Amino acid sequence: MFKKTMVNKLLLLLFLFILASSLPVFMSFRLPGPNKHDSTAVFSTDEDLPDNDLLGPVPGKDTSSGSESSDDDSTVSGSSGPEFEATEIVFLDAEGTGDFATLEEAFLQVTSGAMIMLSKGTYYLESSLEVNKSISLIGAGVGKTIITSNVGGDSIIVFSGTGKFLADSISFKYEGEENSDVLEITSGAAFINRCSFSGGNDAYPEDDENWGIGIYIHEKAECTVTDSICENNDFSGIDVDDYAKATLVNNIIKNNLLGINYYCEQGGGAAINNECTSNIHDGIQIQYGSNPVIEGNYVHDNLRTGIAYYDDSGGFAMNNKVENNGEDGIVIADSSNPSIMYNTIKGHKGYTGLGFWTNSSGYAIGNTCTGNGWGIYVEGTAKPFIGDNSTSGNTESDFIDDRDA
């Protein structure tokens, strides 16, 4: 029989293999040279785009020294965007004096692979806008370039193409009263950087339809979301469904019903170094067979559970800080079997730091549970492997193993 140290090493190797397989394949894009019909020149979106009277300085570009910089009064600071192979570059002004009068007109008339540069200002859409060709949208910063609509539909923008969709430095906001998500990705590959998503609305919360999602990634779409904010949406900040794969890195997910919600047939991708806080229910919810990698996130002060596994879900939760949520820290239930490793779980007074319930299994190794009601609680029908964990200073009990003999 293996010693616990051998089991721990094997689990860690398995985790690293799964994490490597879930990392995104970042998109390779090119920009045209000074002649927009000459696509032989290559340069990156944050260093070599020319400044424009409509745009001001290009987001992420320090024009005084040529080095990268965050925009001082932007609420999101991000990393460099990918390269983009643009068939053409067009410029839009919020007052309608750019290359096209409206954003709808630009989407309709530009070629697949076009880059649309948006000046500071608010762009109003008169209906839900479906995009089925490769498009890149570059704004002047969160809170500066705003795309909004008050007309209900599937989402403000739905990307349903087989190509690529990129959005950088833009606020997306729904302001209507009917059902609507904010951004929906149904296919292709999407890259979202330094954006915000708010106002997703569920007009009839008593029915079984979950409207009001900040970023809805589903079907077989692949999406990377970095350095963005999803807040004040009636359902989830980010929702990953069906067979979609999402890589979520360095985002802030707050003041939604759910923070990040996985409802996949399998997989789901990875959530790394995000902050999930002040959501009405769970900070991160994994269910219905999903098995994402949840690593390095700060999940705190949500009104219910920090991280919750339901309905045969699994995957890894590793090196997360789960603190001061309204109920339990991490919950595993309903035949779920994740590996919970090296997390810090504290401050769930009157509730459980790490709980295995209702036929769940999986592994708990190297976690620190302190300042909770119960440090680790294993319910009668649960069958997890409990390795070396640190439990101290919990008010009711550090460890209860109530599983059936």
Image: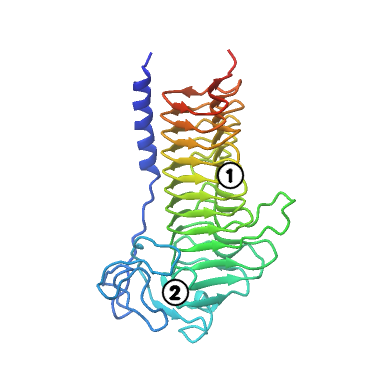
Judge from the rendering whether residue 91 lies leftward or rightward of residue 404; answer left or right.
Answer: left
Q: Image point 38% across, 41% down: which residue? A: 19
Judge from the rendering whether residue 47 lies leftward or rightward of residue 174; answer left or right.
Answer: left
The picture quadrant where one finds residue 62 is bottom left
Q: Image point 45% across, 78% down: which residue? A: 119
Residue 46 picture location, percent across and down = 33, 68
Eyeballing the image, is 85 above or below 282? below
Judge from the rendering whether residue 10 lies leftward or rightward of residue 269; answer left or right.
Answer: left
- Separation of residues labelled 1 and 2 (CA atoms): 42 Å
Observer-side mark, 1 or 2, equals 1
Q: Which residue is mark 2?
A: 111
Mark 1 neighbour class, 10 Å CA radius: few under 14, some 14 to 19, many 20 or more: many
Q: Are marks 1 and 2 in contact (CB under 8 Å)?
A: no
Q: Image point 39% across, 38% down: which residue? A: 18
Q: Amino acid at mark 2?
A: Thr
SS for tag 2? loop
- Using the rendered image of the protein, determine whether residue 81 is visible from the camera's viewpoint: yes
Eyeballing the image, is 312 above or below 144? above
Quarter placement of the N terminus: top left
Residue lying farthest bottom? 97
The picture quadrant where one finds residue 213 is bottom right
Judge from the rendering whether residue 124 lies leftward or rightward of residue 268; answer left or right.
Answer: right
Mark 2 neighbour class, 10 Å CA radius: few under 14, some 14 to 19, many 20 or more: some
SS for tag 1? loop
Quarter placement of the C terminus: top right
Q: Amino acid at mark 1?
A: Asp
Residue 23 picture location, percent across and down = 38, 47
Q: Which residue is mark 1?
A: 282
Eyeballing the image, is 228 above or below 86? above
Q: Looking at the image, is mark 1 or mark 2 earlier in the sequence?
A: 2
Residue 98 picture location, percent across and down = 46, 84
